[in-house]
Image: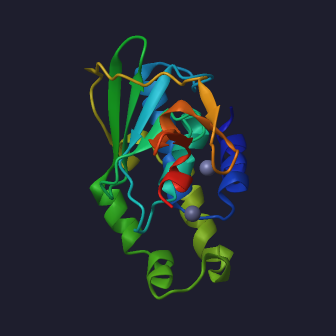
Amino acid sequence: MEMQELLELGIKLHGHKCPAMPLGIRAGLAALRKLSVERAANKELFCLCETGSAHATMCFVDGVQVATSCTLGKSNLKKLEYSKNALTLIDLKRKKAVRVALNPAFQKKGLQSEFVKLRSQGIELQDIPAEITDPLIENIMIQPDEVLFKISEIFDCNFQTEKGTFEWDECEECGEIVFAPGIRIKKGRKLCLPCAEK
Ligand SMILES: [Zn+2]
Ligand SMILES: [Zn+2]
C-alpha cells in the first residue's frame, strides 16, 4: 500500500489527525522492511507494542495496526503497558524479530512542540489549528527511518501464541454463548464471567 493510502486509512480508523498515529505507521513499516515481510494477512506476525493506557502518544498503536495488520481483533497484537513508543515485530514462522523504538532525540523535539504544549493545556485535538498539526504529520511521513527510530538487528525469538478455540457453551444464567476460556463452574452451573461474579 502507498504511504498516502495508509495515512488516509489510519486517519479514518483512528478518528482524528495527530502525530503519534503516523509515527506508528512509520514504525510498523520500518519493522516490516527490516524483517523483509509483508503485512499480516492472517497471524503469521505478532506485534508486542510497548505503549500504555494513560499517556501522550498512545495513538501510536493504531498506526502500528494499520501498517502491520497485527490487530487487537486478530489478537496478534499485545500492549505491554511500558508507556513507551516502541514495538517488537515477530515473524512467527521464521522465529525472528526486530524491535523499533522512537529515536529519543526525535521524540524530545516532538514533546517540545506547540502541538504537545496545547494538548497538555487540555486543548482538544479538533481545536488545534491544522497549521500546527499538518506540518508535524507531513514531516513524520517524509523523514528517513534512521531519524525517526532506533531499529535493532534481527534477533531469534521463540514466541508462543495461543490457539483460538471453537469450543463453546451457553451460560446457564443469561443464556448467552460463551467460548471455553470464559466459562466458570459455580455451584455446579456453567456461567459466563459476569454472571459468575454476581
Ligand atoms: Zn491520535
Ligand atoms: Zn451469563
Q: Residue furthest bottom?
A: 121
Is residue 25 visible in the rendered image? The answer is: no
**Residue 65 at x, y = what percent?**
56, 42
Q: Is residue 102 left or right of residue 185?
A: left
Q: Residue furthest top?
A: 94
Give the percent coordinates (x, y) of residue 108: 32, 66
Can I make out residue 1 in this image? yes
**Residue displayed at 50% across by 80% down:** 119
Instruction: Report the front residue among 27 and 198.
Output: 198
Residue 7, compared with residue 74, is above or below; it is: below
Q: How many marks?
A: 0
x and y, in percent, of residue 94 in the image: 39, 11
Task: Please state the horizontal and vertical placement of residue 186, each as a whole percent of the image.
Answer: 46, 45
Q: Residue at x 73, y 54 (%)?
A: 12
In the foreground, 23 or 135: 23
Q: Is residue 26 left or right of residue 80?
A: right
Quarter of the figure with residue 57? bottom left
Viewer-proximal residue among 56 and 187: 187
Q: Quadrant of the N terminus?
A: top right
Up-down: is 175 above or below 2? below
Question: Which image quarter has ligand 1?
Answer: bottom right
Q: Is residue 93 above or below residue 72?
A: above
Residue depicted at x 65% and y 57%: 14
User: Residue extending furthest front?
Assistant: 187
Colour treatment of the image: rainbow
